[in-house]
Image (tube, rainbow, N blue to C red):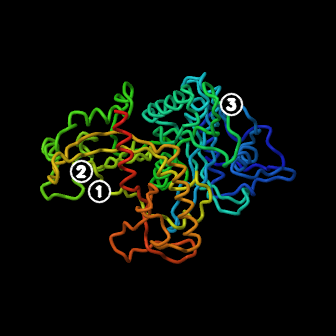
Amino acid sequence: MLVQMIDTNNPPKQLPYDKFSATSIYEYSKGLLGKTLREFIYEGYVTKAGKGGIGQMVENLYFFLDTNNNPEADFSSAGMELKCTPLKLDKNNEYLIKERLVCGMINYCDVIKEDFEHSHFYLKCQLMLLMFYLYRKGHDNLDLEFIFSVLWKLPEKDLLIIRQDYEIIIDKIRRGEAHLLSEGDTMYLGACRKGQKGDSLMTQPYSNEGAPRRAFSLKMAYMRTVLQYVVASKEKAVTNFTLHKEQLVSEKDLATQTFDDILLRRFKPYISKEYHIIANELGVDISNNPKNKYAMIANSVASNGKYSNINRSEEFLKAGLTMKTIRIEYNGAIKEAMSFENIDYIEIAECDNWFESRLYELFSSRFMFVVYREQHEGSEDYALDDVFFWTMPQADLSLAENYWEHIRTNVINEQISQEYWWKAKDKKKFHVRPKAQKATDLAPTHTGGQAKKFCYWFNNDYVREIINHRNTKK
C-alpha cells in the first residue's frame, strides 16, 4: 500500500486510513518506520517528554488522534490499541526488549468488580498495534527512530493462560493482599510496580494496609518472544502473530485446568520413585551417568517425554519460568548452591532502576523446583520427593535489591573482583562467584574494558530455607 504523506501543519479533514479497519491502520503505520517524529512536528505543537510522551505524540502527530483518558482502545472503531514500546541495542548491535509492556494501571477498588471478558485489559489489548522504537539515552523523544510495526492479536492459547493470570491477581486483591502482589505470581500477565520508592500507597479493599501502585503488563519474557518472532521474519512490519516453539500444553488442556496443575499432575505418578527407575520407565538414557541426569529426567516427565529442555518451551519462554532441580542429602543438607546467569556488567551499570533491572526480572519470575531426596546415607539413591512452583517473597526481594545495589556500585567503580562481592559465608541468602569454566573467560564492562565473569547465586542455606518453608505448608 502506498502511504500518503500528510502536511502536519494542516491536519486532514479525512484520516489517511480507515479508522474502522485494523489492517488499514497497520498499513498506514508503515510510513513511520525508519523515521522519527521530528519529520511530522508542526509549529505550535507542544512536545511531550517522559516514557508516555512518545506514545502520545505518535497518536497526535502521526495518527491524528486526540490524547484522552478514555478507557476504550485508542482505535476504538477498529477494536485495536496502540502501544509504543522501546528497544535497545546489545554489544553486538542486536535488538533487545528494554521493558515490559504496560497495559493499564490497576485500581484495586474497581478491578474486583470486573470479570476478565469485561476488563479494561481484555477490551483494549486483545488486538494491538505495536510500534517498536529504538531508545537512545539522552535523546529527545522526537529523534527516536521507529523500527518495527506489528499487528498483533493475542493467540487464543495465550488468552487462556492470561485469563488464569488475571484471576490470580484479582483473587489476591480480594483476599486483602494487594500489598503482597508479585510479578512472580503469574505466567504472562504481570502486576508490575509503577512509580518510585517513597510514592504514596494506594487504598485497597478488604485491608487497611496500603499497597504500592501496580499496572497490568505483559512481561519482558513474553515481549522477548514477540521480538524474536519479528526479527526472525526479516520484515519490518509483521501481522498474524504466531509462534512455533515446543509446546508443553494444549488449548484443550488449558480450557479445563491451570498450567500449574497440568504439569504437577505429570509428576504425581513418579513421586517417591528413585531416579534410575523413572529414567528406565521413560526411556531416558543415563547409562553414561551424565551430570545433568536429574534435570534430564525432570524434563522428560514435564514434557511427557517430548522435549529435552522445557526451559526452551513456548510456555516457559513466554513466562520467564525456570525449572531448577534440587538434591537433598539423607541428613537434610543441600550441598549445592543454585546458579543463575552471568552478570551483564554493561546492563547493570546502565540500569539505575531496580524494577527495570535484569536481576529483578530473574528473581521476581516464577520457578518450578523439582526436588530429589537421598534415601540412604551416602548411597546417592535419590528419589523424586516433591515438585512445586515458587515465587520469591517480597521481604527477600527487598534484600535482593540491596544485593543488586552492592553489585552495581562495585561494577560502576570497576571493583569487579571476588574480594568485593557478597560471599556465601556472609549468610545473606545471595552471593557472587564465578561459573565460567575457564578462569580466563572475560565479559565487557561499561567502560569498554573486560573483566572476569561472575554469576548470580542463591546460597545453599537459602535453598534449604525455601524447602523447609515448603514442607511446613504441605
What's under tag 2, amino acid-wise?
Answer: Glu
Q: CA distance from mark 3 to mark 2?
A: 55 Å
Q: Which residue is mark 3?
A: 71
Using the image as rendered, state which of residue 96 and residue 100 is in the foreground. 100
Residue identified by numbered label 2: 329
Rendered residue at 58%/73% (across/down): 413
Q: For mark 3, does the 10 Å Cα neighbourhood hold few (<14), some (14 to 19), or many (20 or more) residues?
A: few
Percent coordinates x, y for residue 6 in the rendering: 76, 49
State the CA–CA distance, disc 3 to disc 1. 53 Å
- Look at the numbered disc 3 and give the secondary structure of its residue: loop
Q: Earlier in the sequence, mark 3 or mark 1?
A: 3
Q: Counting other residues with Cα less than 10 Å from the Cα at mark 1, is it few (<14), some (14-19), or many (20 or more)?
A: some
Q: Earlier in the sequence, mark 3 or mark 2?
A: 3
Q: Residue furthest right?
A: 44
Where residue 339 appears, as percent x and y from the top left, is 38, 58
Quarter where residue 349 is shown: bottom right
Between 312 and 66, which is closer to the camera in this rendering? 312
**Contact (CB < 8 A) between labels 2 and 1?**
yes
Task: Give the vertical position of 13 relative to 226 (above or below).
Answer: above
State which mark lies toward you, 3 or 2: 2
Q: Are marks 3 and 2 in contact (CB under 8 Å)?
A: no
State whether residue 472 is above or below residue 34.
above
Residue 204 shows in this picture = yes
Q: Earlier in the sequence, mark 2 or mark 1?
A: 2
- Amino acid on which disc 1 is placed: Lys
In the rendered structure, find residue 335 and report the number of the disc placed on it. Answer: 1
Kind of residue sitting beneath label 3:
Pro
Q: Left of 401 or right of it: where is 370?
A: left
Residue 140, by quadrant, is: bottom right
